[in-house]
Image: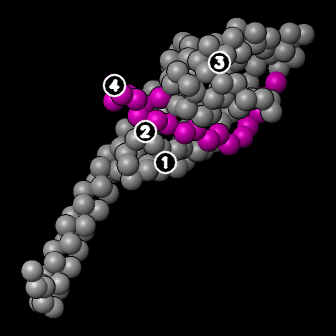
Amino acid sequence: MKINMTTIVLLWGLSFIINSCSMNSMGKNNKDTKAIIIQTEKEFAEMAKQKGVAEAFLYYAADDAVLFRNNTVIKGKKAIKDYFEKQTLKDIKIEWKPDYVDVANSGDLAYTYGHFTFSGIKPGGQSIKADGIFHTIWKKQKNGKWKFVWD
C-alpha cells in the first residue's frame, strides 16, 4: 500500500482531533472526580467529629493503607486499628479541610492537602493542640468508593 503526503496529513489531523476530544473528556472527568474527592474529605472530617477519629480513619482507610504518625509508618488496616486502640490521648479531635486536590489522568488516584487542627488531653490532664498541613493520597477501590492509602 502506497501512502502519500495527503494521507499522512489527514491521519495526523484525525489523530489530533481524537486526542483533543479525549483530553477534554478526561479534563471533565477529572473535574467531576475532584468534586467527589472533596466531598469524600468533607464526609471523612464530619465522621471524625461525630463518631470519633479512630472510627473515621478506620472507615476511610483502604485495607493496605499507611498512616505516618510520630515518625512511624503504620501499615495496613489492622495496624491502624491497633494504633488507635493503644492511643493514650483522650478527647482527640481533628478538624481539616482540603486546600487542594488533584487527580491522576487514569482517574483512580488522587491527592489532597490542606490545614488541620489537632487537640487532645494527655493522661495527666494536660491539653495539647497542634496545627499543621495534612497530605492524603486516595485510591479508587474496585467497588468505586474512594479510600485513603496514605495519610
Specify the segment rendered in magenta. Answer: 128-147
Q: Residue at x 29, y 49 (%)?
A: 29
Residue denoted by label 3: 80
Residue at position x 50%, y 18% from top? Answer: 59
Residue at the right extreme of this rendering:
124
Looking at the figure, which quarter contains the N terminus?
Answer: bottom left
Dot 2 or dot 4: first in sequence order is 2
Label 4 Cα crowd, 10 Å radius (few <14 / some 14-19 / many 20+): few
The disc label shown at residue 37, or none:
2
Residue type at numbered disc 2: Ile
Decide which of tag 1 and tag 4 comes sooner along the chain.
1
Q: Residues within 10 Å of mark 3 (few under 14, many from 20)?
A: many
State which mark lies toward you, 3 or 2: 3
Q: CA distance from mark 3 to mark 4?
A: 22 Å
Crowd tier of the residue under label 1, counting other residues whose Cα lies within 10 Å: few below 14, some 14–19, many 20 or above: some
- At mark 1, the secondary structure is strand
Residue 143's mark? 4
Q: CA distance from mark 3 to mark 2?
A: 22 Å
Disc 1 and disc 4: Cα gap in Å? 22 Å
Q: Amino acid at mark 4?
A: Asn
Label 1, label 3: how many angstroms apart (C-alpha)? 24 Å
Mark 2–mark 1 Cα distance, whole angstroms, equals 8 Å
